[in-house]
Image: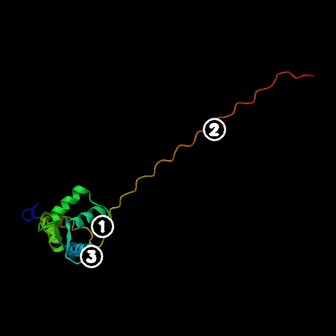
Amino acid sequence: MTEAEKLNAGVIRMLTKDQFIYILNVWVQEADIKHELQLSFKVFDTENREYLELDEIKEIVTVYGDHPFDEREALEIMRDANVRGDGQVFYADFIESLFSLAPELYKMKTDYLYENADEDPSVPPEPVVEEPPPPPPPPPPPPPPPSAPPPAAKGGKKKK
């Protein structure tokens, strides 16, 4: 639903002070993300060139991190990262391209924050924790050893 549709439908409501602060806090985090990205670049740019070569980017995204990218994803990132087309990925260009490539994400974020403004802003969202898989069942007990046959009686009659 667009803002105009919300206005026409009469569903615009006033946010409380806490709700407004919560929404504003979420938006301020964008600057932190940009800063963290720049610091990450600098870790790998040991020569302080203000850029990384495409092969360096490929190594970073396929080797480092919690979830390294596969070859196809790495090629896509390198294509998007090479903003100037010269094989050099300048921090500022790349970071700005990340945030300007998808303005629809900003709209989605705004819509989400507006729709969920009734959530208590003082309570952080629950972290998503993946449950570990259940342990495998225990192996079956080993079969009992074969029982020995009862001893056979010898000779049936006693000698006198």
Q: Is residue 20 among what the camera can see?
A: no
Q: Which residue in the rendered view is the most extreme toward the right? A: 160
Task: Tell me if mark 1 has few (under 14), some (14-19) or many (20+) residues whose alpha carbon lies within 10 angstroms of its own.
Answer: few
Name which of mark 1 and mark 3 comes first in the sequence: 3
Q: Nearer the viewer, mark 1 or mark 2?
A: 2
Instruction: Give the labeled residue for mark 3.
Output: 46
Residue at the image point whose x is 43% and y is 52% from the top: 134
Q: Position of residue 135 (x, y in %)?
A: 45, 52
Comparing 69 with 1, the one in front is 69
Query: Which residue is located at x 53 percent, y 43 percent?
Result: 140
Residue 127: x, y in percent?
Answer: 33, 65
Quarter containing the N terminus: bottom left
In the structure shown, which secondary structural element does the residue marked by tag 1 occupy? Answer: loop
What number is the disc on residue 145? 2
Image quadrant where residue 47 sits: bottom left
Tell me which amino acid carries mark 1: Pro
* Amino acid type assigned to the residue bearing label 3 in the image: Thr
In the rendered image, residue 136, in percent from the top left (x then y), is placed at 46, 49
Q: Image check: 9 left or right of 116?
A: left
- Crowd tier of the residue under label 2, counting other residues whose Cα lies within 10 Å: few below 14, some 14–19, many 20 or above: few
Q: Which residue is mark 1?
A: 125
- Residue 84 locus on image (x, y percent): 11, 68
Secondary structure under tag 2 reads: loop
Of callouts 1 and 2, the N-terminal one: 1
